[in-house]
Image (spheres, rainbow, N blue to C red):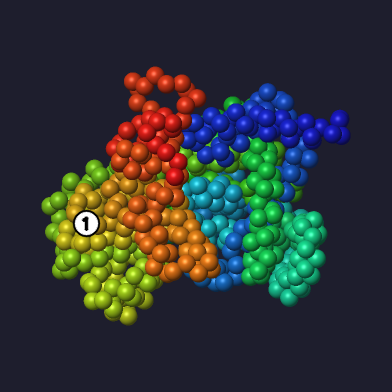
Amino acid sequence: MDKFSIIRDIALILAVSLPVLFLCRKIKISPIVGFLVTGIIIGPSGLHFIAQNEQIEVMSEVGIILLMFTIGLEFSIAKLVKMKKYLLLFGGLQVVISSVAGFFVIYFNGASAQVAIFLGMVASLSSTTIVLKLLSEKSAVDSPHGRISIGILIFQDLAVIPMLIILPLLKGGAGFSLGSFVLKIGLAGGLIAAMIALARFIVPKLLYYVSAMRMREVFTAMMVVLVFGTAYLAHMVGLSFSIGVFIAGFIIAESEYSYEILSEITPFRDIFNSIFFVSAGLLLSLTALQEHFMQIMILSFLVIVVKTGIVLAIVVFLGYPFRTGIIAGVSLAQIGEFGFVLAKSGTEAGIISNAGHNIFLSVAIISMIVTPFLFEFAPRLLHILRLKTDSDMDEMPEKPTVLENHVIIAGYGLNGRNLVKVLKETGIPYIILELNPDTVRQVKADGENILYGDITKRDILLRAGIIKAKVFVYAISDPQSTRMSLAMAKGLNPAVYTIVRTRYVTEIEELIKLKADSVIPEEFETSLQIFSKVLAEYHLPVNIVLRQINIIRQGGYHALDGYYCTECDGNIFHGKRQPRDWQVSQRARFARCHGCNNYFHRTERYADK
């Protein structure tokens, strides 16, 4: 065997994945599916360009390690304390109920109790990599379903520790003793305590001295030692690599070096994560899929439906809307990367056979491939169903609010609370719409005019008095819900003035199409704050600075958007397809003016500001 074959394999993986990813981009499919398909194409069951080998497995494990470390950096102890409800309540219920449900499904299909317990635990786990990537692509990390999904995922990742520890119990025989089991639990607890102490008191000091040297190479080397050192330390006492780096990551997140470390590690994480998904595709045995096709399809269907149903039931039971439960459910409907680790350990321990392992891998990979499609389709399906049932609501007895010329505030986060303070001082009537039942209960006890409800529902908007409202402010971090609600609100009351907060510039065009009156992108507002501070440092008069800011805001941020139409001074949006009757070179770059709605080549009728 060529000892340098890993170099060829990496080059081949990336070379084949590029056209596959390009095709996925064209047909708007998640790149995760592209990497999985790449692995299937070039793997042992496909063209046989690459066989699954230990070097590929090691690189995929590195991808998981880096992913869990960056997750830890983004979720500090303070955030985890705030998320304790999502972490413990949602996560605990999901893992326990899914494990029990998986046990009964597998046991009544003829498996032994040990195999059913083991596979039930494995099936309860979801893919942190896939879900976080899907939520990030949709800017939905801070949405209700995003927070619920992330809380459940973190609990699942932590639950891997006891799952790995109890493997000898399931194996039975001479390989297990109560003393060694207790010892392993003690070592795990001691390691976690030691890592927390190291990361809390010693690592920040080391990072300070390393950063004081002002040598980037030394800082990067220290980061690598920190990541892989903690991973191997966890592995030495029988834990997974990922748990060690996750704990180190979320402790270090409290330090001032977390952003620098994150920026250094992100490029490596993305590359190795890609290799992980390709390696998952390599595992798929088309022979096993063909031999056990019906069984694999039925099990895949059951995994997706049962896991979605369990999350939906938990979310609705705890007081959240049906829509939030569905989207969170389909997000977590796959078997995750830690399932591969546990399945491999179970096969080595003799709990499941090689044939059973191949069936499990097929089910896991199919569920991974299906998840991005379900995540994309679920909100649209819910919207279609809601539109079909809206006509049935016309005869419902409506109890709208008695307010008139009031402000409807969607979301009671930081922006919502600040707006309420101002409205209260000025005497302007308002009503708050919020999805978090705990927030509603607490705020209502303080005497605030708050209503629990989903802003994408027609009857909730009617009860909030949308017909007589003057202003509707969207202060939430859920782009999909915002767009659905905006279209519905404008349909019910075209005169209501809508103000939409959005994180990214790319969302402006679609919101304007939905007739949003004012879109406030955080990216542009940050730019305004930066240049106002710079101008102030050069002692420009405050009135001049404010005038420049007002001109930009009143112009819909066109001045920051790069190009404007010379005919109507409207904003330019790039990347639009030209009308069919246009016969222009394909190399031309097309754009559309929002003001006059004309399509044209970038050199025609618009200029660079």
Residue 284 falls left or right of residue 386: right
Most extreme residue toward the bottom, as rendered? Answer: 446
Q: Position of residue 557 (x, y in %)?
A: 39, 52
Q: Is residue 20 above or below residue 112?
A: above
Q: Position of residue 91 (x, y in %)?
A: 52, 61
The residue lying at 72 percent from left, 26 percent from top is 49
Pick the quarter of the image with the N terminus. top right
Describe the element under mark 1 as helix, strand or loop: loop
The residue lying at 69 percent from left, 33 percent from top is 13
The residue lying at 46 percent from left, 21 percent from top is 585
Residue 214 seen in render? yes
Q: Position of residue 114 (x, y in %)?
A: 64, 51
Amino acid tagged 1: Val
The residue lying at 30 percent from left, 64 percent from top is 409
Residue 173 falls left or right of residue 521: right
Residue 372 falls left or right of residue 164: left
* In the foreground, 479 or 243: 479
Q: Position of residue 569 (x, y in %)?
A: 33, 43
The residue pinned by badge 1 equals: 496
Pick the quarter of the image with the C terminus. top left
* In the foreground, 512 or 108: 512
* Crowd tier of the residue under label 1, counting other residues whose Cα lies within 10 Å: few below 14, some 14–19, many 20 or above: many
Residue 443 falls left or right of residue 52: left
Residue 177 seen in render? no
